[in-house]
Image (cartoon, rainbow, N blue to C red):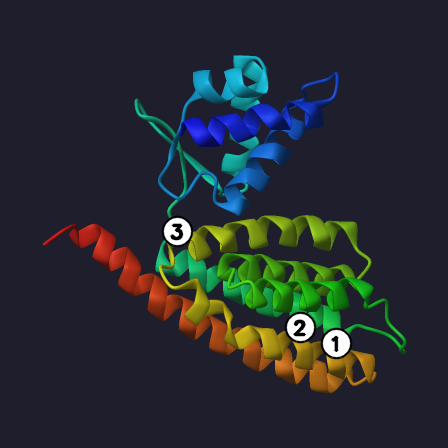
Amino acid sequence: MAEQLTGLAGDRVLLGRTSTAERVSDILRSRIAEGYFPPGTRLSEDSIGGALGVSRNTLREAFRLLTHERLLIHELNRGVFVRVLTVEDVEDIYRTRALVECAVVRGLGAPPYRLGGLVAAVEEGHTAAAENDWKGVGTANIHFHRELVALAGSERTDELMRSVFAELRLAFHVVDDPHRLHEPYLARNARILWALQAGDTKGAERLLETYLADSLERVVEVYRRRVGEDAAGPS
């Protein structure tokens, strides 16, 4: 926890002069997504509030916001914890992704499209893979799909999917083999990008539908095994 708190202390500059709960929740959301606070971690009000230099009331409001986003959970007489997703949570996340992401691609008008963010995310993924940074590949993958959603030009959709992608990261942090999980999607993201560059939205949607179905199956398989192992404990 000491290392995580040191990182948070460096985030004070992001708060500016007004330490609003929204800004604190932004910082904590990012730190949770990056794996600084893994699923199941208890978040100490005193330690985190001290690291960020914010009041207890501000921090509690930030916790409340992140609980509403399903990233944290409050347990009576125990405190606030980073959520550990169930398999059903993971399945619901992918249902939401399929509904939104495929609708975004289907609703694109005539090309050309603003694909710079997708290009950068594909390059980010290949760079991380070359450095054997498979968690970085997972981050690049999230960036790719976030940029895909952004093609809709809708702040509401972006806001919705920001929370969905943050929840998805909770599942990724439980997986013990990020290489096996993320590597296949480097090429698949590139193929979706190529289809959009060619103006083939129907082809891109078909690729995306198959991608999400395969990803769900793979993530649930790995997640169910890992959560089951953790519940069983050491033999």
**Mark 1 crowd level (few <14, some 14–19, many ≥20, 10 Å Cα):** some
Cα–Cα span, label 2 and label 1: 6 Å
Which residue in the protein does label 2 denote? 102
Amino acid at circle 3: Leu
Residue 40, image x and y in percent?
Answer: 35, 40
Quadrant of the drawing holding the N terminus: top left
* Left or right of 179 in this view: 10: right
- Disc assigned to residue 106: 1
Image point (50%, 68%), residue name: 182
Quadrant of the drawing holding the C terminus: bottom left
- Does residue 118 lie above or below 80 as drawn? below
- Does residue 11 lie above or below 229 as drawn? above
Image point (46%, 37%), residue name: 72
Residue 47, image x and y in percent?
Answer: 45, 19
**Mark 3 crowd level (few <14, some 14–19, many ≥20, 10 Å Cα):** some
Image point (51%, 65%), residue name: 94
Residue 8, image x and y in percent?
Answer: 55, 28
Cα–Cα span, label 2 and label 3: 24 Å
Which residue in the protein does label 3 denote? 85
Cα–Cα span, label 1 and label 3: 30 Å
Amino acid at circle 1: Arg
Frontmost of labels 1 and 3 is 3
Question: In the displayed image of the protein, which residue is found farthest to the front?
Answer: 131
